[in-house]
Image (tube, grey):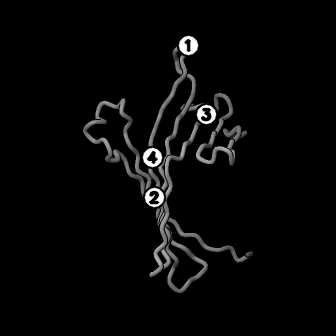
Amino acid sequence: GGVLEGVKYSSQEPNRCTISFVKAATRNAERIELFSNSRESAFRLSDGAFYATECVRQVSLGYSREYGVARQLVCDYQNAWTYLPSPGDPDTIRGEMLTAGYLQSSEPDYFEVVTDPVVIFSHRFTMTRSKDT
């Protein structure tokens, strides 16, 4: 058995996604709500590079150790993707994804960093078109 119970997405609310987990399958959340706050993209004609960014608020909901009190954790992220066609190989694209995490106003150090990320993750990847298509 897996840990994922379901994913709900509606075209009526395109900026919201709900992820539900099987009961007691995870320690951190029973459900996660994702809210997309903004999206932008750009294309650079000179080398075919495509850029995209998205700001997301993640609300993790679960049970606390205190009876009758729900556990809620709010995190704000910004994801930035870069896609570059590989020179000489039209079936391959190189990419990078950066994820920046920000503090909430309830955090003690919030007013020291306000708009600066407190963590940044970087992932590089390569996508190659399947020979079946």
Q: Report the disc number at residue 21.
A: none
Binning the other alpha carbons within 10 Å of mark 4 as few (below 14), some (14 to 19) or many (20 upward) gives: some
Q: CA distance from mark 2 to mark 3?
A: 25 Å
The residue tagged with tag 4: helix, strand or loop?
A: strand
Mark nearest the camera among 2 and 3 is: 2
**Residue position marked by numbered label 4 in the rendering:** 77
Q: CA distance from mark 4 to mark 1?
A: 30 Å
Q: Seen in the image, is 69 located left or right of residue 119?
A: right
Q: CA distance from mark 4 to mark 3?
A: 18 Å
Q: CA distance from mark 1 to mark 3?
A: 18 Å
**Residue position marked by numbered label 3 in the rendering:** 31
First in residue order: circle 2 vs circle 3: 3
Q: Quadrant of the N terminus?
A: top right
Q: Amino acid at mark 3?
A: Arg
Q: Residue at x 70, y 37 (%)?
A: 5
Q: Residue at x 69, y 42 (%)?
A: 8
Mark nearest the camera among 4 and 1 is: 4
The percent position of residue 91, horizontal first and vertical second, equals 61, 79
Q: Residue at x 54, y 17 (%)?
A: 69
The residue tagged with tag 1: helix, strand or loop?
A: loop
Up the image or down, 52 lies above or below 11; here it is below
Q: Amino acid at mark 2?
A: Ala
**Residue position marked by numbered label 2 in the rendering:** 80
**Residue position marked by numbered label 1 in the rendering:** 67
Q: Residue at x 53, y 86 (%)?
A: 88
First in residue order: circle 2 vs circle 1: 1
First in residue order: circle 4 vs circle 1: 1
Front-lying residue, 49 or 41: 41
The percent position of residue 37, horizontal first and vertical second, equals 50, 46
Q: Amino acid at mark 4?
A: Tyr
Q: CA distance from mark 2 to mark 4?
A: 10 Å
